[in-house]
Image (cartoon, rainbow, N blue to C red):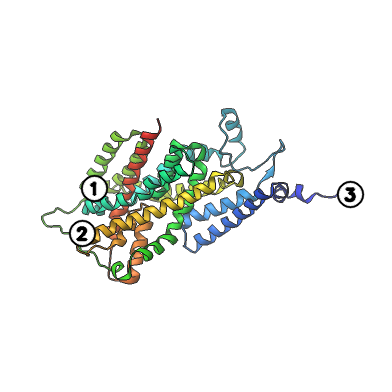
Amino acid sequence: MESIDFFKLFQGFGTIANSEPMLAIVRILLILLGALLVYLGKKGILEPLLMIPMGIGMSAINASVMFLPDGTMGNLFLDPLISEPDELMNIMQIDFLQPIYVFMFSNGLIACFVFMGIGALLDVSYLLDRPFESMFLAMFGELGTFLTIPIAVLFGLTLKESASIAMVGGADGPMVLFTSLSLAKHLFVPITVVAYLYLGLTYGGYPYLIRLMIPKHIRGIKPEAPKRRNKKPINSSMKLTFAVAMCIILCFLFPVASPLFLSLFVGVAIRESGLTHIYNFITGPLLYGSTFLLGLLLGVLCDANLLLDPKILILLVLGIIALLLSGVGGILGGYILYWTSGKKFNPTIGIAAVSCVPTTAKVAQKEVSKVNPKAFILPNAIGANISGVITTAIITGIYITFLSN
């Protein structure tokens, strides 16, 4: 009886045995990292809707490498590097996630769907209630988006690549996805993966930054209620007018980013128009379904072969720098308002200007509540959060407009 070759029968193990040692080690580490992401998502330490499918996908893609008929090693999930039409049409009949990648991910459609859902969840009354405070903080919360570019250039990246990774500092995944698709398509996969991995870590990292930069006695300041003398209440008509006006103005200024602006402000408009059934669809099946597919696709894009690009380590470092600088910038903006208000403003609100909606606003409130349970800063934080989203979208438009040519 002919002996059975274990590695040919169980090809996941066989491809590890036949790979370069570094590739094999990276595959095993990514499988373990994927399992860790699932665990952290289940515990609520990271965003479960994104991290659980991403973790499972990351583990599966690196465990399921097989020997293909042409002698090479690959998988049956997707190939992001396929660009020839004939090859693409052929592989879409084989790789089960390839159609979703081609028709929803690689053209930014999922990013726009997620952004539409985010828009529908935003109550812009917080922004309209404190417009100058919110926009001031939002500009400081973009510090990483600006300062990471010269740092990335020093690391040897081109200006377009630098702008793409710098957008991680805006802490808004759809913006990073959209910018890298437009400016650095060859680094689109690793930049997007780095961005979403790090955005999940804002839950765990920013609280320590707050504690490091803001003493307890300042962290516990209870903000003053806004003075609303002779002001009309902010109603749905005002918010709808704001959404329409902002959408038109931003589309005039930056047409290259108009899909993002339209998606965001359509969401806001649906919320304020009272279209309950559409609102429930956008904030339910569309948002959750798109986020789930986004996480799953990000996971299966974490193929060891793709992530062994020499630039990956640089991108990992720059992603941390961008988010750290933006967090520091937001808190510095908060300190400026703290000093100019006669020490009545809580600078912790500044971290919410980093537009990871609504994560950074919740992080700010949580850290303040630990010190002073009576201090309610969430309205101020949400205002800064929403301004951060809009500011990040504007910066995306600026970078794509000026660097595309």
For mark 2, give the secondary structure.
helix
For mark 3, give the secondary structure.
loop
Dividing the image into 4 quarters, which one contains the C terminus?
Answer: top left
Examine the rendering and report whether any part of residue 177 can be seen: no
Examine the rendering and report whether any part of residue 7 can be seen: yes
Question: Dot 2: few (<14), some (14–19), or many (≥20) neighbours within 10 Å?
Answer: few
Q: Position of residue 296 (x, y in %)?
A: 53, 49
Mark 3–mark 1 distance (CA, rounded to whole Å): 77 Å
Residue found at the very far right of the displayed protein: 1
Mark 3–mark 2 distance (CA, rounded to whole Å): 86 Å
**Mark 1 = which residue?**
239
> The disc labelled 1 sits on which kind of residue?
Lys
- Looking at the rendering, which quadrant does residue 243 occupy? top left
**Mark 3 = which residue?**
1
Q: Position of residue 297 (x, y in %)?
A: 53, 46
Relative to 196, say whether 156 is above or below: above
- Looking at the rendering, which quadrant does residue 260 occupy? top left
What's the mark number on residue 340? 2
The structure residue drawn at horizontal position 62% and vertical position 38%, both measured from the top left corner, is: 94
Relative to 296, say whether 398 is above or below: above
